[in-house]
């Protein structure tokens, strides 16, 4: 084992520690700030936590466009959305407990999520994302935020006050989560190269998983703390943020290249995953067996993606 591999293992360990510790602080501070404003845990997950944990996807996508590799943006968005639903929710429920929603997501939020997935599918059918379409995506995100914040039920009878330390901890922990995810992603990719794993496989699988690490760790941490509503809200909000912001904002920095192979399998599969999310939450709860089913579909997605690359 060379010194370079040992260094990468050390970076990976440190990055994972920062990611886990940062997510722990992020969940606690975000919930306290939200509750002090009378916001429910689910809405906190949909907005503050979801957008914070989606920053790695946005940062990596903008960097890709600036580096002339804009073709990976679509893969990051679609792959991360699939990972959030199938892997994140699957892990939370299969190895945790039954998730019971404390907020009616079927009224508005879930239709908005499904609508965002179908809008992305329609917009990419011509193999490009125009400036008008990008602006429509940003407008749709603003509409979602306004609706979420204005229509949510306020939490009352809570004597909770957030101090400046809570806001500072939210910022610091968000940075830790983002930096930890980026370094984890980088070290995993470096280790894959060192062990001579096909770079295309790394790009199609590890990149999506790497940028979804904040959602994975934050959601699992939230569920472990008995805050399942925050975990579900994190996944829902992250996917809407990915579809609208992570897809649209990088297009302002350069032209996006949409690989046509993404339109043949990964994009339709994302629609299927989104519909599965809708189905498993209809009853207001997600069971452990449904969590295992989501994980099985995710394993199939990985297997199919790898087999396509190796053909």
Image (tube, grey):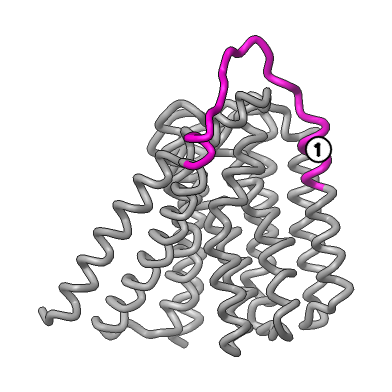
Q: To which residue does mark 1 refer? A: 108
Numbered-mark total:
1
**Could you tell me which residue is drawn at 44 percent across and 29 percent down?**
97
Please give the range of residues in magenta.
144-168
Give SS at disc 1. loop
| Magenta span contains residue 254 | no
| In this view, 296 is above or below 60 | above
Binning the other alpha carbons within 10 Å of mark 1 as few (below 14), some (14 to 19) or many (20 upward) gives few
* Residue 242 in which image quadrant: bottom right
**Residue at image x 67%, y 52%?**
274
In front of the other: 189 or 292: 189
On screen, residue 76 above or below 271: below
Position of 173 compared to 259: left or right? left
Which residue is found at the position 81% from the left and 52% from the top?
Answer: 142
Q: Position of residue 40 (x, y in %)?
A: 65, 26
Residue at 72% x, 34% y is 105
Q: Does 219 appear above or below 192? A: above
**Residue 141 placement, left or right of 230:** right
């Amino acid at each position: 084992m060379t010194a370079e591999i040992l260094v990468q293992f050390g970076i990976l360990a440190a990055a994972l520690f920062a990611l886990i510790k940062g997510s722990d602080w992020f969940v606690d501070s975000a919930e306290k700030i939200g509750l002090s404003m009378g916001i429910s845990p689910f809405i906190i997950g949909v907005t503050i936590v979801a957008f914070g944990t989606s920053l790695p996807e946005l940062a990596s996508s903008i960097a890709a466009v600036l580096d002339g590799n804009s073709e990976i943006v679509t893969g990051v968005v679609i792959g991360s959305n699939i990972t959030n639903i199938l892997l994140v929710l699957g892990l939370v429920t299969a190895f945790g407990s039954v998730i019971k929603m404390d907020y009616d997501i079927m009224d508005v939020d879930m239709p908005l999520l499904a609508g965002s997935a179908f809008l992305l599918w329609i917009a990419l059918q011509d193999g490009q994302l125009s400036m008008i379409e990008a602006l429509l995506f940003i407008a749709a995100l603003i509409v979602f935020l306004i609706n979420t914040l204005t229509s949510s039920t306020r939490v009352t009878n809570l004597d909770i006050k957030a101090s400046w330390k809570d806001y500072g901890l939210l910022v610091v922990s968000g940075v830790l989560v983002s930096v930890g995810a980026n370094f984890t992603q980088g070290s995993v990719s470096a280790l894959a190269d060192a062990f001579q794993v096909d770079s295309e496989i790394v790009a199609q699988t590890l990149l999506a998983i790497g940028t979804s690490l904040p959602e994975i760790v934050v959601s699992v941490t939230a569920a472990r703390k008995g805050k399942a509503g925050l975990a579900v809200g994190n996944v829902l909000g992250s996917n809407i943020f990915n579809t609208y912001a992570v897809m649209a904002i990088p297009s302002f920095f350069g032209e996006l290249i949409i690989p046509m192979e993404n339109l043949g399998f990964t994009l339709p599969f994302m629609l299927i995953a989104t519909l599965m999310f809708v189905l498993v939450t209809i009853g207001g709860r997600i069971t452990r067996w449904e969590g295992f089913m989501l994980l099985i579909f995710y394993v199939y997605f990985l297997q199919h993606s790898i087999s396509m690359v190796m053909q």
